[in-house]
Amino acid sequence: MTFPRYIHFVFLILSLIAAGTAAQDATPYPRISQEAFKARVPFFDYAREVPLDGRVVREWDSQATLRQKIVFRGAQGFLVPGYLEFPKQATKPYPLALLLHGWSGSKEAWYEEGNIISGGEMRTALLDSGYAVLALDAATHGERSNEIDYQHANVFEDPKAPPTRNYFTFAEISVQTVKDYRRALDYLATRDEIDMERIGLVGYSMGGMDSFYLLSVEPRIKMAVACVPPLLSEGYGPASPIDFTWGIQDKPFLLLAGRQDEMYDAARFEASYKAYIESPKTKLIWYDQGHKLTEIYVPDALAWVKAQL
């Protein structure tokens, strides 16, 4: 080994040791008690007597898939739009992967390649592997921007932009979105295409946060992949991902995270995983990336779905 390569090797080893030491010394994000968690679970309940009124409003029939635009009534009675897509090479009933987009995104993000969530790549990989997919617009996002006077749901505003009104808090948006995905499952249960015993989800950023809640409170969801979820625990009321780790300890759960992500402290993220989540059914994979993991996460997410669902 030449001297320059030796120096590089030593530096790499020291960096890994330092990273491991930092993770060991880091303090996990605080978590409420199990009793307090149980008190928060009812925040995600919904009135099942509200009519679903689910229907297909448009179809796209391609050589590989059949995509339907569906609408149904969410927990508050408003119509919720989504894309339900089936792989033609597979046979029904299909296993289903719910797709949850990030903050300020929409269901369309899963139909675009090369974007911040590599949505098109992830969706296509699932369909090619025989999974049906369902992507909804989160509350106040996409076609649901009418809920906020057609403004763009993004708290990271240009300070020079005109003032806007915050009609809903982040927590309210997450709670509503989780309820609506539960209602979507109620609607799918009235149809014959989906295997209701094989339902999982892939969520990115805010969708990764919402995966904590859905996996915790919805028994029909068997597994989840959470990509770069900010493990926020302050100021989010009933919607703090860390607090809902109480409800996911017996389900397969994959966390995909970027060491350069500015949305969380990597050392505290890993400390929180080891303190609250780590089990024989869970896994954490790190990438040397920021909040945009790029398409390199897709094979890991797909492998987890195929192994667990």
Image (cartoon, helix red, strand yellow):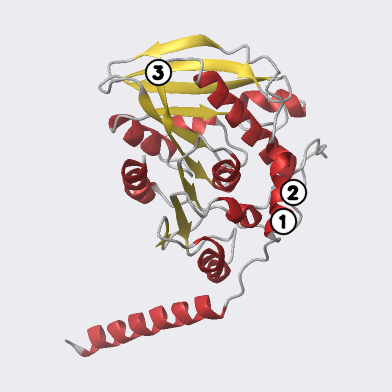
Mark toward the start of the polypeptide (2 vs 3)? 2
Looking at the rendered image, the disc whose residue lies closer to the viewer, 2 or 3, is 2
Note whether residue 170 is visible. no
- Position of 129 with respect to 132 (left or right) is left
Q: Position of residue 129 (x, y in %)?
A: 29, 33
At numbered mark 3, what does the secondary structure look like: helix, strand or loop? loop
Q: CA distance from mark 3 to mark 1?
A: 38 Å
**Toward the viewer: 281 or 109?**
281
Question: In this rendering, would 53 be left or right of 303?
Answer: right
Q: Which residue is mark 1?
A: 35
**Which residue is pictured at 27% across the width and 16% down the height?**
63
Write down the quadrant of residue 223 in the picture: top left
Query: Which quadrant, please, contains the N terminus?
Result: bottom left
Assess whether mark 3 and mark 2 are in contact (beta carbons under 8 angstroms).
no
Amino acid type for the residue under numbered disc 2: Ala
Mark 3, other Cα within 10 Å: few <14 / some 14–19 / many ≥20: some
Q: How many marks?
A: 3
**Which quadrant holds residue 306?**
top left
Q: Nearer the viewer, residue 275 or 107?
A: 275
Q: Amino acid at mark 1?
A: Glu
Q: Which residue is mark 2?
A: 39
Q: Which residue is mark 3?
A: 193
Q: Where is 163 relative to 296, above or below?
A: above
Q: Residue at x 59, y 62 (%)?
A: 264
Q: Is residue 74 left or right of residue 291?
A: right
Compare residues 289 and 94 and report the one nearer the observer.
94
User: Between marks 1 and 2, how big is the CA–CA gap?
Assistant: 6 Å
Q: Position of residue 161 (x, y in %)?
A: 77, 41
